[in-house]
């Protein structure tokens, strides 16, 4: 823990300077914020499974999933800090901060580090890390907490050296006259290489995954530390954990899950993560045929592969339903029908749809105006045919030796008589005729 007076001295040194407070970084970590120090040269990046870490106290910078140099941005609190000096008792003094109204001109805390996860061969880690302020809105003061024994700094871009295996939560509080905000990141100093594999990373719910730990001591670790007791802590991302080395876990809800393994020994631990994607239960089916002339009989087959499927419901789109697994249904009327299939299992339900298209031959009809008259009368014939799809060609036989292929032709009858008219309509599926006997009377 850091001394209670440290915070006060950093933020209100003008208010309580007479207290005799001083900033001192206690513990094994060391910080330098006022004197320029050259950053030590680090070796090449080490990726798990590729190459060997350098033995000794040399810092090795890895690049496993979700780690590496990165900007660390925090939430902007935009609060005005009201400082109240308190009586000093020896070396102890402090301040009280009160959050008031938000202010858009307060700083937005942000920082980066040259490395956020390092592997150091045992037994004595010495890890200098350079922190760089990236805060916006012109902060005028900075307060760093390095997460090690209360070590702090008021420099803008401090260099801090970690001397122990641990996960360190680093916080930067950036401040100006309008308010302050903070951002936090974790620095991991690791004595082991944590890794794992799984038999699958993607599948439908319920998804059972076998996880296998592949963690290992760093190459070059002295033999005295190789027999250290190992431990494992798994977080499967759905609220369930395990301390087994090689656990099996079943996901019972769809979603994207980040699995984290922390593994280590008596010296300390490290971590790694992987993503598991669980797809929702999916209903599937086939229909055969999906189109044809009425009456059309269709066979529907439930092809859902979920072994826990417990129920089915079919809506054939024409007002009829079924709960059978593989029903047949006959459509008697032409049209387009949207079929919906709902399936349920122990974890929820799912539905799929398809369209059944039912065709028909033309339905032929016609009329004429007028249907009687004297010789020389011209009659207008009107096609009233329909169909799915609709007719595309027509034929008329007027009963007096004349014909036409127009859809709605006029025709003049020159002689008296009673005439039978024949009319056909044709679509993509066939031709249908209609005869009207003695339909036209000419006197």
Image (spheres, rainbow, N blue to C red):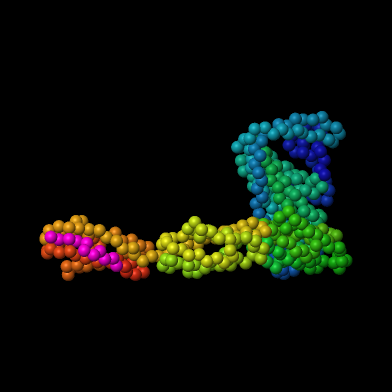
- In this view, the residue farthest toward the right is 224
Residue 257, position as x, y percentages in the image:
67, 57
Q: Residue at x 62, y 35 (%)?
A: 103
Question: Front-most of 56 and 33?
Answer: 56
Left or right for 7, reference 284: right
Residue 203 visible in the shown view = no
Hey, which quadrant is residue 262 in on the image?
A: bottom right
170 versus 212 height, above or below: above
Left or right for 348, reference 383: right
Q: Residue at x 29, y 67 (%)?
A: 433
Classified by dominant secondary structure, the portion drawn in magenta counts as strand
Residue 439, position as x, y percentages in the image:
22, 62
Magenta residues, start to end: 433-443
Question: Front-most of 80 and 365?
Answer: 365
Q: Quadrant of the C terminus?
A: bottom left
Left or right for 390, reference 212: left
Q: Residue at x 48, y 67 (%)?
A: 297
Residue 18, position as x, y percentages in the image:
80, 31
Hey, which quadrant is residue 392 in on the image?
A: bottom left
Left or right for 352, reference 135: left
Residue 374 visible in the shown view = yes
Q: Residue at x 51, y 58 (%)?
A: 320
Question: Front-most of 261 and 90?
Answer: 261
Q: Quadrant of the N terminus?
A: top right
Residue 107, position as x, y percentages in the image:
64, 40
State how many labels appear: 0
Q: Residue 207: within the magenta?
A: no
């Amino acid at each position: 823990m850091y001394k209670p007076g440290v915070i006060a001295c950093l933020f209100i040194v003008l208010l309580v300077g007479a207290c005799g407070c001083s900033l001192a970084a206690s513990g094994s970590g060391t910080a330098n914020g006022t004197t320029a120090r050259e950053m030590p040269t680090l070796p090449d990046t080490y990726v798990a499974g590729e190459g060997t870490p350098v033995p000794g106290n040399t810092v090795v910078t890895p690049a496993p999933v979700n780690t590496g140099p990165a900007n660390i941005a925090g939430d902007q609190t935009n609060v005005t800090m009201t400082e109240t000096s308190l009586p000093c008792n020896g070396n102890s003094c402090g301040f009280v901060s009160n959050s008031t109204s938000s202010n858009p001109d307060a700083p937005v805390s942000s920082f980066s580090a040259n490395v956020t996860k390092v592997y150091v061969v045992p037994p004595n880690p010495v890890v200098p890390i350079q922190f760089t302020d990236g805060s916006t809105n012109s902060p005028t003061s900075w307060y760093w907490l390095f997460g090690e024994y209360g070590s702090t700094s008021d420099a803008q871009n401090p260099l801090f050296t970690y001397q122990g295996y641990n996960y360190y939560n680093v916080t930067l509080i950036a401040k100006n006259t309008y308010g302050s905000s903070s951002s936090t990141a974790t620095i991991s100093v690791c004595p082991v290489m944590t890794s794992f594999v799984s038999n699958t990373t993607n599948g439908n719910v319920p998804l059972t995954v076998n996880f296998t730990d592949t963690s290992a001591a760093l190459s070059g670790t002295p033999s005295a530390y190789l027999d250290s007791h190992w431990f494992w802590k798994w977080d499967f991302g759905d609220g369930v954990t395990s301390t087994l080395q090689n656990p099996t876990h079943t996901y019972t809800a769809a979603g994207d899950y980040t699995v984290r393994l922390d593994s280590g020994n008596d010296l300390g631990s490290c971590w790694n993560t992987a993503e598991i994607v669980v797809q929702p239960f999916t209903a599937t089916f086939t229909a055969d045929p999906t189109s044809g002339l009425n009456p059309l009989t269709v066979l529907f087959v439930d092809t859902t592969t979920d072994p826990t499927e417990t129920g089915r419901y079919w809506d054939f789109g024409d007002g009829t339903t079924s709960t059978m697994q593989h029903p047949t249904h006959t459509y008697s009327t032409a049209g387009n029908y949207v079929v919906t299939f709902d399936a349920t299992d122990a974890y929820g339900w799912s539905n799929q749809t398809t369209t059944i298209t039912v065709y028909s031959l033309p339905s032929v009809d016609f009329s004429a105006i007028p249907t009687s008259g004297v010789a020389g009368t011209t009659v207008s014939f009107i096609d009233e045919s329909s169909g799915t799809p609709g007719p595309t060609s027509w034929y008329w036989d007027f009963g007096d030796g004349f014909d036409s292929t127009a859809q709605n032709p006029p025709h003049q009858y020159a002689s008296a008589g009673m005439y039978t008219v024949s009319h056909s309509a044709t679509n993509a599926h066939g031709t249908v005729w209609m005869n009207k006997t003695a339909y036209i009377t000419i006197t």
